[in-house]
Amino acid sequence: MLVISLLVVVLDNTILNVALRTLADPVHGLGASQGELEWSINSYTLVFAGLLFTFGVLGDRAGRRRMLLIGLVIFGLASLLSAYAQSPAQLIAARALMGIGGAAIMPATLSIISNVFDPRERGRAIGMWAGAVGLAVAIGPVLGGLLLEHFWWGSVFLINVPIVALGVLLVALLVPESRDPAPGRIDVFGVLLSVVGLVTLTYGIIDGGEHGFGRPLVWAAILGGLGVLAWFVRYERRSSHPSLDVRLFRVPRFAAPVAMIGLVFFAAMGVMFFSSFYLQLVRGYSPLETGLLFLPFAVAQLVFAPRSATMVRRYGARAVSAVGLMLTAVALSAYAFVGAATPIWLVLVFFFLQGAGMANIMPPATESIMASLPREKAGVGSAVSNTIRQVAAALGVAVIGSVLAAGYRGAIGPALADLPPTAREAAGESIAGAYAVAEQLGPAAPGLVAAADDAFVSAMHWSAVLAALVAAAGVLVALRWMPGRPGTAAPVPVGEPELAGAA
């Protein structure tokens, strides 16, 4: 039931990516502009990332099942509003409301797993939970393509409603309630600082990724968000009732997997961003076919993630996560050798390797984070893990997307010299813009398309190298700080006076 609750949250965002072109159509969609399409995605991401930590803390206090039920109800109602939105502004507002529901659902699922399952079973349960994330990322475009081929655009949101209704019923019947038995006073100021800091930082990352990092507003948001989060850390260190015990980041068993999750999602989401353009534009696959091509990633997640706990018991979290990161780095670096004519089966092998690698990173990393906390603080651990993942994914898309855009502009420039200024600007902005310009060029179109493909592939190579280096940095983190085989080191007692010395 918890996996289903998680699936509906992650699935929705990947489905929407397929529907963007339809939403831009004034006849069959809402006639949304490029900026409105961007905010239909970003309004969800911004609210979701900003409130994850807050809802994790509130779930520990008010009850995790209660928070999960509240999140499902909000998510279902917001999905209904999204499906029948009459304008882009209504859709953006409804998506922000969905972000509130999603932020309540995601940390609750993981914290309930930590409280319901015995420690001997928890690793496997977390493996299934992590596999569900990878599955949703991969099957979302497939499901979205199928829905759009047979129904109107609102179906990609409406499909959530019956699933959520069933989820509310089954959670109420099957999931036991759990909460922190001694929550103490709520850290209102600390929670507000976390919301302001995360929202501001995420906004700066998103805006910079879309419009470039050369504007003062972007850096004001990024540096301002980091400054508020630094204030949050300082305040939490001095608070007698902190919502987050920041001393945890001095404990390798907590800090190392948090860093690993951030690094791998930065790298992986940046690559998935440009691989979708590669498949649809350079290789000419439809959205549905592109979604089907991502299935090897999902299959690898389903096969390996539930088995990662067994591997950890046999070889230790350090070895399993290091091998997973190495596999991921190899798969990402392989894109540096992919061209416009590379056999597609080879690309599918890379997807499978990436899925297998990530399936052996998330479960041991998440298990290490949750095991380093007492059960009554599970919501905080879940919220930290999910917040880092969400912010790192947004940052990866922004930074690697910027590297891709800069490389493309530099490579396509000479081929645009003879075009009119307006067409030159559009074709130089992105490969999608070049394809749009080519439709108006007549006999000269094949030459521009070929130049755009070459420029994009060249830029993709440099972006892949950056992503692979980031993933490789995660290998060093795992080898240096992740725990070894079970029983080789005693867990650090969080909250004890000896914490600093033990760390």
Image: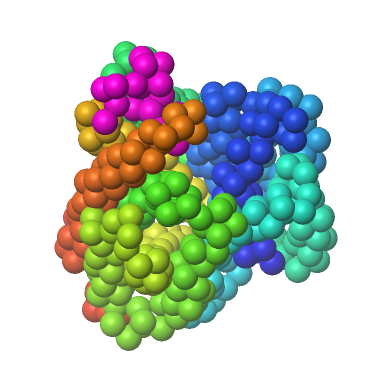
Please state which of residues 166 and 135 is positioned toward the viewer in this rendering.
135
From the viewer's perspective, tell me whether residue 278 is left or right of residue 63: left
Q: For residue 416, which quarter of the picture? A: top left
Name the image quarter holding residue 55.
top right
Considering the image in quadrants, where does the C terminus appear? bottom left
Q: Main secondary structure of the magenta part?
A: helix
Q: Residue at x 30, y 74 (%)?
A: 320
Give the residues in magenta. Answer: 415-437
Please tell me which residue is depicted at 26% across the width and 22% down the height of the picture.
417
Please tell me which residue is depicted at 47% across the width and 40% down the height of the picture. Answer: 243
Q: Position of residue 124 (x, y in %)?
A: 49, 76
Q: How is the image coloured?
A: rainbow
Q: Is residue 407 visible?
A: yes
**Residue 202's x, y, as percent?**
43, 31
Q: Is residue 432 magenta?
A: yes
Closer-to-camera residue (326/196): 326
Looking at this view, name the residue that lies furthest to the bottom: 314
Question: In this rendering, does residue 81 appear at all?
Answer: no
Q: Is residue 158 left or right of residue 138?
A: right
Horizontal side of 375 relative to 283 (left or right) equals: right
Corner quadrant of residue 139: bottom right
Image: 257 above or below 453: below
Toward the front, the furthest residue is 443
